[in-house]
Image: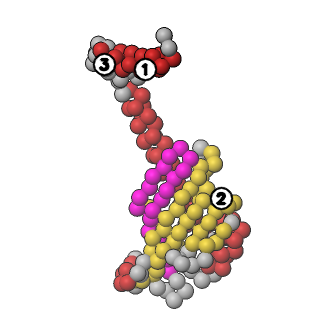
Amino acid sequence: MSRYRVRIALPTLLFLGLVLAPTAPSVAQVPGGRPGEQLSRFKAGLARVRAEAMVAISRQLAQWQDDWTNDDAGALAGQYADSAHIQLVPGGPMIEGKKAIEVTYRDMLARVGSMGLQIRDFDAGENLAFVLGDYRYNDAAGRTERGTFVMSLRRLSHDRWRIHTQLFAPATGDTATGDTATDGG
């Protein structure tokens, strides 16, 4: 048989084998169990990872608020990764690195009162989490300033997360400031 015939015959035989092969209903089998069993276990595991991350990060944000209230810029900076980036207002300077973040917060703590954070949305995987939330603080004049924050965190160990990026964006319009007497503090 010549090379030319072999080149044509082999693809033809493969095609005919596929077309003429008996078809049986195929059921996806997962090794070690029923169809879809591993997917169910994966979803349950992911839900557990998210829940554990949410608890750990909620505790961390509560500690962040306490550190802010206690004017402890060093403890605040300790919650950030060495290569962290924060931006305090859209278009404002990008503050890079844990040391620069500590200096920035040390300056801010002298001018800003207590800070409150509230999580609005959250997602996490095994080692990366994203948080969207609202913040509120009292400025030196006693006005309440509000806005939105977004952050990404990376897991260092089981319960230990570090802030990697963070953006604070003030609210605009009538929602930007409020009277502390009507805001409850």
Name the residue rendered at 65%, 75% in the picture: 104
> Mark 1 — residue?
8
Q: Is residue 20 visible to the viewer in this orientation of the structure?
A: yes
Q: Is residue 10 visible to the viewer in this orientation of the structure?
A: no
* Image disc number at residue 112: none
Q: CA distance from mark 3 to mark 2?
A: 58 Å
Q: CA distance from mark 3 to mark 1?
A: 17 Å
Residue 125 shown in magenta: yes
Name the residue rendered at 51%, 53% in the picture: 129
| Circle 2 crowding by C-alpha within 10 Å: few under 14, some 14–19, many from 20 | some
In this rendering, position of residue 68 left or right of residue 47: right
The residue segment tinted magenta is 120-138
| Circle 3 crowding by C-alpha within 10 Å: few under 14, some 14–19, many from 20 | few
Residue 84 sits in quarter: bottom right
Name the residue rendered at 50%, 46% in the picture: 125
Dot 3 and dot 1 residues touching (CB under 8 Å): no
In the picture, which quadrant includes the C terminus? bottom left
Counting from the top left corner in percent of width and height, residue 57 is at 52, 54
Counting from the top left corner in percent of width and height, residue 68 is at 59, 70
Q: Earlier in the sequence, mark 3 or mark 2?
A: 3
Q: Return the residue found at the far bottom.
A: 141
User: What kind of residue is marked 1?
Assistant: Ile
Q: Relative to the observer, which residue lies in front, 159 or 31?
A: 31
Q: Earlier in the sequence, mark 3 or mark 1?
A: 1
Counting from the top left corner in percent of width and height, residue 19 is at 30, 19
Q: For the stretch drawn in magenta, what is the main secondary structure?
A: strand
> Mark 2 — residue?
81
In this rendering, position of residue 121 left or right of residue 141: left
> Mark 3 — residue?
19
Q: Secondary structure at mark 1?
A: helix
* Structure colour scheme: secondary structure
